Each structure stands twice: as C-alpha cells, then as structure tokens.
C-alpha cells in the first residue's frame, strides 16, 4: 500500500482511508517557503484548485486565493485558512548552493514535520480537498486562503473591505487536544489582543535637585498602579467562560543615572474577550500620561448556535472521541470575520503548543479527520441554513 493510500496513523474509529491526494498536497504547500513572501504558496494553491476542482477560482490583488462551488445564490459556507507562516527556525530551512531556500520536511510516526504544517497549511490542504469532493447541501461552498494572518490579518481585512462576507465560516486554525488527548474540538470563542502604550511626560532636571522637575518614571508607575487594579475582562459564550488578562510587559524611561527623566513608556498587553474591554483610559487620570492603542486584534464569538452545533455534530461523526465546544486563547482571522458579521467557528488539526515551534508538526490522521469534518459541514448544511 502506498503512503498516500495508507491510513496515516492509529485508527480513529471511523475506518476511513486517507483522503485522496491530501498528503502530497500538504507536503507541496509546506515545502514552499512563505514567511517573507507568500506568492509561491498562493501560486501552488491556485494551480491545484484549477487543475483538481470544478470550482470558480479567483486570486485577488492582495494575494488571497478563493474557490467557490455550489449554488451562488444560496448562503455561503466558507472554509478559511492562511498560507503565510512565521519565519522558520534554523533547523527548518536549508539553503542550496545557489542561495535558494527551501523548508525541511520530515515524516515519522504518522506525522509531517516542518514550518507551517500545523499553522496552518495542513488544514488548508484538507479544506482544498473538501472543496473538491463535497456536494454542498443548499449552500455555496467557498474556500479562502488569506495572506498576512501572521502580521495582523492583513489579507482577511483586505478581503472583507473588498466585500468578502460569507454567512458562515469554519476557520481551520488549531482546535485539537483542547478537551482531551486526540480529540479535535470546535472553538466557539477566542480572545483578542489589544496592545497599548502609556507615555508619561515629565520635566527633566539634575538628579541632585529632583524637586525642580517632574519625574516621568514616577508618573508611569502611578499609571501602572491603575493597570494593576483593573479587573480582567470576562464573558460567557455558549456556556463557555472566556476570561481575558491585562499585563504590563515593558517599561522604558530615562537617559542617564544623574538626570530626572522627562519621558517614560509602558507597554500593556491586554487579552480581550467578546464584548468587553478593560477601561485602560483610566490611566489618563494620572497627570502627564497619554494612552494610545497600537494594535487591536478582535476576539471572536460564534453568533449562531445552530451552526456551532452542526459543526460539532460533523466533528463527532468524524472521530471516535467526544469533541466539545471550547475556547481558544489566541486571536485568529475569525475575529475579523466575526466582527464583519460572519458566524464563525474554528476547527483544525493543529494541537496546542505546536504552532510557531522549531519542532512544528501535524498528524496525517487528524488532517483526514478535518477533511471529513469540513466536507460534512458542507453536505449537512440543512441543519443550520
């Protein structure tokens, strides 16, 4: 039996064979460098969709790739991923004599190792195969792979601005091993991230006469005390508790040991939750302190219970474990889609702790499982449309 016909790992209770072509497609996408420039990976996705599917394929000006099949006048169910990756570790890249870089791949124990396997080219490949094989039930099935997810959702935001607005979306970021070992769950909410800077202004003077100036570090410390006393944001989504956090992570002020500083900057990391933000504006009650927001990646909460339940039912049908609705701690492109009005869940092969590591890997067995989930959602859409 060839590698592409093998079961890909321990039997998960479905007795389903490996998805036709999923392994070589995953290897192709993962082997294509896309940390500096995702163009080549986008080319590979586009050419495969045109050659292997009957979908209407589009590549927008931003580099995002789309494929659509089913009824264009029906509600749209999108299978969403991204093909950019974070920079590889030294062990994950090799350079040829001509200076050409390629990503190192390794296979062992039913897993594929390499940059982008878990985050998230494996799930992208599973979604592509699902688009090829699914017979959508009263919906338009859309595949979308974005650029720039790792740098703030650049591609997703651009697509939304251009009118990308599916009614439903399954975002293929990691949801495996959340409720239990070997289980692929369905994420119904995730945290966002708001990065802020507090700038405290003062008046410098010689350190021997501090009363002649205004110490910006002292003012910054007063603002830090305000942050420390704030309650963490918290909410509940579909019975699941989502609790954010606030932390001062950097402080920078002063120019010399004998000068009272006239400026001090404080960095604040806030993990936001759907519908809630910490009142960081209270820091401006401290004289001389200004608060600015540097980045605000939105949280996500699924807005459609029936859709979330239908994806969970598809996940149960695809595995022997007992998947659950869970919460994810990390921001994803689902936040931008949800903010724009799409009902979103997250379901994907990546396990907790795999993404962005030098030993990043994905299970072929779980990729097959994700393919079955994605296809099942499209073919049982009558449960939520």
Image: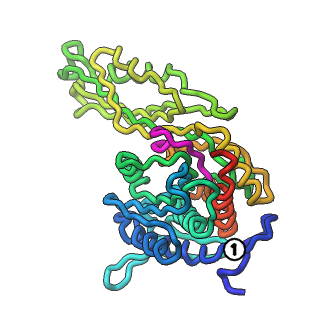
Say if the magenta span includes residue 362. Answer: no
Pick the residue in front: 356 or 254: 356
Q: In the image, which residues are magenta?
A: 335-347
Query: Residue 263 at what x, y percent from top left?
Result: 25, 27
Residue 259: quadrant of the picture? top left
SS at mark 1 in the image: loop
Query: Residue 68 at what x, y percent from top left?
Result: 49, 61
Q: How is the image coloured?
A: rainbow
Pick the residue in front: 207 or 190: 190
In the shown orientation, is residue 12 left or right of residue 304? right
Are there few (<14), some (14-19), or many (20+) residues within 10 Å of tag 1?
A: many
Give the position of the N terminus as an image quadrant: bottom right
Pick the residue in front: 96 or 79: 79
- Which residue does the numbered mark 1 point to in the structure image? 18
Residue at 38% in and 76% down: 101
Residue at 59% in and 49% down: 346
Using the image, determine if residue 39 lies above or below residue 162: below
Residue at 43% in and 75% down: 47
Using the image, determine if residue 121 lies above or below residue 32: above
Numbered circles on residues, count: 1
Residue at 47% in and 38% down: 339
Residue 360 visible, this angle: no
Residue 95: quadrant of the picture? bottom left
Pick the residue in front: 123 or 87: 123
Residue 381 visible, this angle: yes
Query: Residue 305 at what x, y percent from top left?
Result: 66, 38
Using the image, determine if residue 249 lies above or below residue 224: below
Query: Residue 323 at what x, y percent from top left?
Result: 74, 50
Residue 217: quadrant of the picture? top left
């Amino acid at each position: 039996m060839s590698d592409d016909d093998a079961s890909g790992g321990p039997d998960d209770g479905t007795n389903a064979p490996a998805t036709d072509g999923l392994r070589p497609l995953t290897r192709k996408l993962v082997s294509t460098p896309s940390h500096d420039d995702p163009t080549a990976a986008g080319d590979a996705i586009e050419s495969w969709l045109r050659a292997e599917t009957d979908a209407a394929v589009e590549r927008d000006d931003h580099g995002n790739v789309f494929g659509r099949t089913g009824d264009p006048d029906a509600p749209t169910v999108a299978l969403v991923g991204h093909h950019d990756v974070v920079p590889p570790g030294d062990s994950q890249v090799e350079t040829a004599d001509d200076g050409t870089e390629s990503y190192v791949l390794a296979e062992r124990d039913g897993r594929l190792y390499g940059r982008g396997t878990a985050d998230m080219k494996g799930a992208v490949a599973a979604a592509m195969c699902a688009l090829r094989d699914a017979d959508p039930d009263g919906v338009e099935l859309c595949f979308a792979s974005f650029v720039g997810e790792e740098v703030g959702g650049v591609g997703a935001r651009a697509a939304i601005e251009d009118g990308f607005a599916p009614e439903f979306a399954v975002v293929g970021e990691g949801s495996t091993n959340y409720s239990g070992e070997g289980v692929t769950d369905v994420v119904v909410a995730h945290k966002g991230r708001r990065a802020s800077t507090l700038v405290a202004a003062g008046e410098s003077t010689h350190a021997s006469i501090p009363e002649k100036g205004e110490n910006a570090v002292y003012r910054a410390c007063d603002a830090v005390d305000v942050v420390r006393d704030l309650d963490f944001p918290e909410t509940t989504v579909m019975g699941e508790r989502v609790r954010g956090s606030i932390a001062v992570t950097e402080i920078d002020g002063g120019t010399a040991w004998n000068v009272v500083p006239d400026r001090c900057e404080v960095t604040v990391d806030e993990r936001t939750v759907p519908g809630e933000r910490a009142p960081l504006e209270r820091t401006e009650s401290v004289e001389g302190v200004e608060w600015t927001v540097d980045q605000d990646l939105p949280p996500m909460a699924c807005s459609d219970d029936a859709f979330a339940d239908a994806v969970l039912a598809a996940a149960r049908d695809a595995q022997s474990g007992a998947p659950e609705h869970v919460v994810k701690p990390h921001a994803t492109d689902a936040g931008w889609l949800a903010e724009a009005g799409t009902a979103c869940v997250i379901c994907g092969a990546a396990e907790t702790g795999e993404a962005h590591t030098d030993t990043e890997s994905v299970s072929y067995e779980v990729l097959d499982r994700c393919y079955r989930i994605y296809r099942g959602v499209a073919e049982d859409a009558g449960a939520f449309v």
